Amino acid sequence: MPRKGEKKEEIKTKPPPPAGGSPPPNGPKKEAIDGLPPNPHSPSALASQPQVVPRMHVTPASSYSNVAGRIPVGSPSIRRDNRNQGSSHFNVSAKRDLQKLPLLKDAPPNGREELFIQKLRQCCVIFDFNMDPLSDLKDKEVKRAALNELMEYITTQRGVITDSIYPEAIQLFAVNAFRTLPPNSNPSGAEFDPEEDEPTLETSWPHLQIVYEFFLHFLEAQDFQPNTAKKFIDQKFVVQLLELFDSEDPRERDLLKTTLHRIYGKFLGLRVHIRKQISNIFYRFIYETERHNGVAELLEILGSIINGFALPLKDEHKTFLLRVLIPLHKVKSLSCYHPQLAYCVVQFLEKDPSLTEPVVTGLLKYWPKVHSPKEVMFLNELEEILDVMEPVEFNKVMQPLCTQIARCISSTHFQVSERALYYWSNDYIMSLVSENCEVLFPIILPALYKHSKSHWNKTIHGLIYNALKIFMDMNQKLFDECNAKYKESLEMQEKQHERRLEVWSKIESLALQNPQIFKVPHFRATLGVLNERPPTDSQERVVPESFLPPDLTDKSADSSSPDILKKPRHLMRRKSGLPHDFETAQAIHSYQAAELPSATPLSSSEDSNLSAQ
């Protein structure tokens, strides 16, 4: 039953896009569960024990052979570590000799519960899979068989989960799963490429996988009672479970995702705590480490949780959107979890359209400047937001939004420009633009005009022509007006450029009249920059006599000075020894000619030429 004052939240099973802790609270440690003796492998007992990291045994100098002198006698061969496998730090049990117990199906009915508990405790023995994976092979097989038998038993039998089973089953999962994770093989938090990079796998997975599957069947069993299990599955248990999401093994993160989702659905009292701890993980990821392996899985869980939020949304949920989900866009490893993040943002906007303006403003705030693949991801998410955006909300953000889209159209990266031009193929977006064409045409059309001929990619030319044709058919009169204004702006830019050259030439002439000009170092580099074209390969740079220092213009300074004054000093340009390619030079010249401001856009009267091209 939900707590008083808290609305029950429905968890829908609509899955989001597939995926590619903070310290526990202070409180007394439980040493015994329901009168049972404390288990030496419980989390509280393990936490109280010192964590000893195994070291490689160093052979003393006295054991070296007199003949070899360098190779230790009887030393084991050094095994090369597999870079794609790693193991967590388990506290290996001291007594690992397991005796095979009878099968549960062969035991009498009155003794099955006791035998079930014995097998649960037997599976709490921890083995070494890292330093010596070939040790205790017989005992490892006994544990694996027992785990499979336990999982099959609770799946096929009814009425087997009694009150005495809850502490033992939960203890089994805690001892085997809660552990110290190995050091991250990617400490810098770089992006993971599933096509090229191989994930780091857990060496203890043969046992760990069955433990996760057993606990999932335990939570999903018809005899499972959350009111009884909440004594043992508490806030500390949830914190330790969330810490495991930083595991590098994707198989473990996938099972953790399902386990946490089942706990969130069955334990209503833990829902607020789970959301709070997930927020803390994201805060640490955004503002401190920028490295976490389970962000995609946590966002996938949140997608299902957000889908079940009751309306109206609480302030807590809105704060989570604006302070957690939106800042997640600025992390450099966004590509690892962006589909799940975009799904969560769209779910919020479908629940409450009034959040559109702060969400779009936040996206524009974190819009990438120099990261083109990230900019394409932002454009993908923005189109998903526009698909669910109400026309009233679009009117609030249309000017800054379309200004950013126009910048993307003007991008020299063809993928960014191409993705932005695909917006005009979306019927709903074009309907929003047509309702506000008087405001949006002057923002969008200049970017299309500017790159209709000057962009280096021919595919972009075709997309721009198609976009111009669409806008022309939408409102031809307004299209012509914007075209005329754009031509006037080009002429004004030319006049301003000429005016600027005149001003600088006056400043240069005034500077040359100053007798102190030759005392300024590098004065030549600051003169004639705007109105002087660089010489070609066949030309030479000539320094006039008026630019020479006084010591060179003084004929009495040196006997060789008359020869210098008779002919201006020539600064020869060093030519490259590489061969010249005529086609390359011609292509560069045509490219530079296309960028001149004299290139004007096509008018509506040239519609036939557009269609012909």
Image: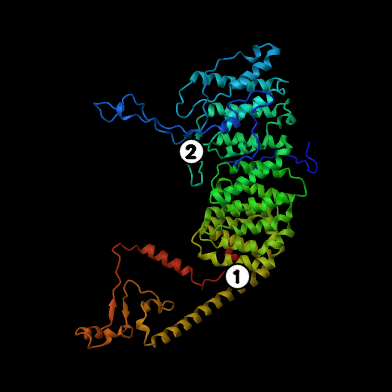
Q: Position of residue 70 (x, y in %)?
A: 28, 31
In the image: residue 100, left or right of residue 64: right
- Can residue 475 be seen here? The reply is no
The local secondary structure at tag 2 comes to loop
The local secondary structure at tag 1 comes to loop
- Dot 1 or dot 2: first in sequence order is 2
Task: Tell me the residue that label 1 is attached to.
Answer: 603
Residue furthest right as drawn? 4
Q: Quadrant of the N terminus?
A: top right
Q: Position of residue 580 (x, y in %)?
A: 33, 63
Q: Position of residue 367 (x, y in %)?
A: 58, 58
Residue 575 occupies quadrant: bottom left
How many numbered tags mark residues here? 2
Task: Tell me the residue that label 2 is attached to.
Answer: 198
Residue 395 versus residue 277 in the image, above or below: below
Q: Residue at x 43, y 34 (%)?
A: 82
Relative depth, front residue between 337 and 278: 278
Q: Position of residue 431 (x, y in %)?
A: 70, 58
Residue furthest left as drawn? 559
Q: Quadrant of the C terminus?
A: bottom right
